[in-house]
Amino acid sequence: MEGISHITFIVKDLEKASAFFKSIFDAEEVYSSGDKMFSIAKEKFFLIGNQWIAIMEGEPLKERTNNHIAFKIKEEDFVKYEERVKVLGVDYKPPRPRVAGEGRSLYFYDFDNHLFELHTGTLKERLERYRE
């Protein structure tokens, strides 16, 4: 096992989803199928850091859950990302109380009911805190 290859999100509107990923995550669009379909639907590929993210046209999630993907951010960038989320107008949850030392998180939904998290901590920090 080498790790995660890519993460795909099914979205109703490719352009609206593209703006979401670019505005919040500084995602770099590296591919757009246009009107061609090499897969099961029109799609776009992005890089967020070194992670390949795909969006594919389809029916959005009907219900929201706590299943989510979390992206690591620096503590000093927390407010910057919080402002990006607010400006885009997506539904976001204020940071929840956490155990000291495990980092801060910002949770928000995209326009297709996918839940995202921006987190300042690391697994190592969290495990160290839980051992205390």
Image (tube, rainbow, N blue to C red):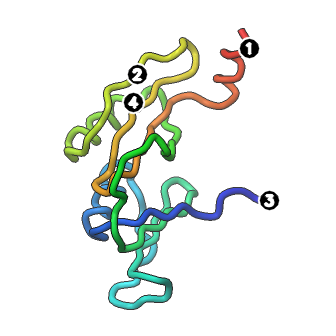
Q: Residue at x 50, y 43 (%)?
A: 71
- Would you name the residue on which mark 3 appears? 1
* Residue 22 can be seen, yes or no: no
Q: Is residue 37 visible?
A: yes
Q: Which disc is residue 78 wearing?
A: 4
Cα separation, mark 3 vs mark 1, equals 28 Å
Residue located beneath label 2 in the image: 96
* SS category of the residue bearing label 2: loop
Where does the N terminus fall, quadrant-wise? bottom right
Q: Give the answer, above or below, for where 2 lies relative to 76.
A: below
Query: In the rendered image, which quarter contains the C terminus?
Result: top right
Question: Mark 3 belongs to which amino acid?
Answer: Met
Helix, strand or loop under label 4: helix
Q: Secondary structure at mark 3?
A: loop
Circle 2 residues within 10 Å: few <14, some 14–19, many ≥20: few
Question: In front of the other: label 1 or label 4?
Answer: 1
Mark 1 sits on what residue? 131
Q: In front of the other: label 2 or label 4?
A: 2
Disc 1 or 4, which lies upstream in sequence?
4
Q: Residue at x 29, y 37 (%)?
A: 92
